[in-house]
Amino acid sequence: MLKVIKMTTSEELKTRLKLEQIRIERVMNQAKDEKLGKIKGGEEMVAFVNEDACIGCDQCPTVCDDDAIDMYSKPLKNPLIEVSSNRKAKIIREDCTGCRLCVLICPTDAITMIER
Ligand code: SF4
Ligand code: SF4
């Protein structure tokens, strides 16, 4: 007997994709909330950048809603290596509200929260 195989329609695929996006977003938000819960923030705290660990990726100033992060150029310690730009992040302490978003986004864990 011939078996009829039902093909998935493009509409069904779109729906599945959408549901999967929602699921991933939910998992990511949950992971973010869990990580945030472990980092002390708020008015009495301020972000601090470990300059040696900062790779100048520019992500922290992008997420900082308070414009509390500046990027600056720093000469390399080894003058034999030439790079066009050796950028680092710097926290403007007065403008930092202690929201912790920069800590979450930093790919090298260069930012920590310290007491003011
Ligand atoms: S803790 Fe928040 S306000 Fe402070 S520098 Fe980081 S992102 Fe900006
Ligand atoms: S996110 Fe981290 S590595 Fe990137 S510029 Fe900011 S402190 Fe540096």
Image (cartoon, rainbow, N blue to C red):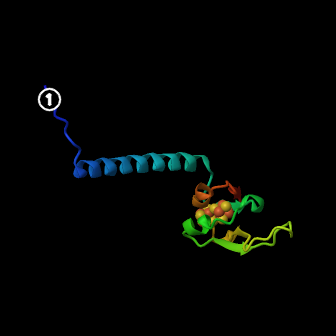
* Number of marks in the rendered image: 1
Q: Quadrant of residue 90?
A: bottom right
Question: Ligand 2 is located in which of the four quadrants?
Answer: bottom right
Q: Residue at x 56, y 68 (%)?
A: 62
| Point 77% across, 60% down: residue | 52
What residue would you read off at disc 1?
A: 2
Q: Quadrant of residue 45?
A: bottom right
Q: Is residue 83 left or right of residue 95?
A: right
Identify the residue at horizontal 46%, vertical 50% (top origin). Answer: 29
Can you give x and y, in whole percent of width and height, for residue 111 in the image? 68, 58
Front residue of 27/11: it is: 11
Q: As drawn, which residue projects farthest toward the front?
A: 1
Judge whether residue 98 can be spotted in this image.
Answer: no
Q: Quadrant of the C terminus?
A: bottom right
Q: Position of residue 67 (x, y in %)?
A: 59, 73
Secondary-structure class at tag 1: loop
Q: Residue at point 61% right, 64% down?
A: 60
Q: 10 Å neighbourhood of mark 1: few (<14), some, or many (≥20)? A: few
Residue 114 percent location from the top left of the image? 71, 57
Quadrant occupied by the N terminus = top left
- Name the residue type under label 1: Leu
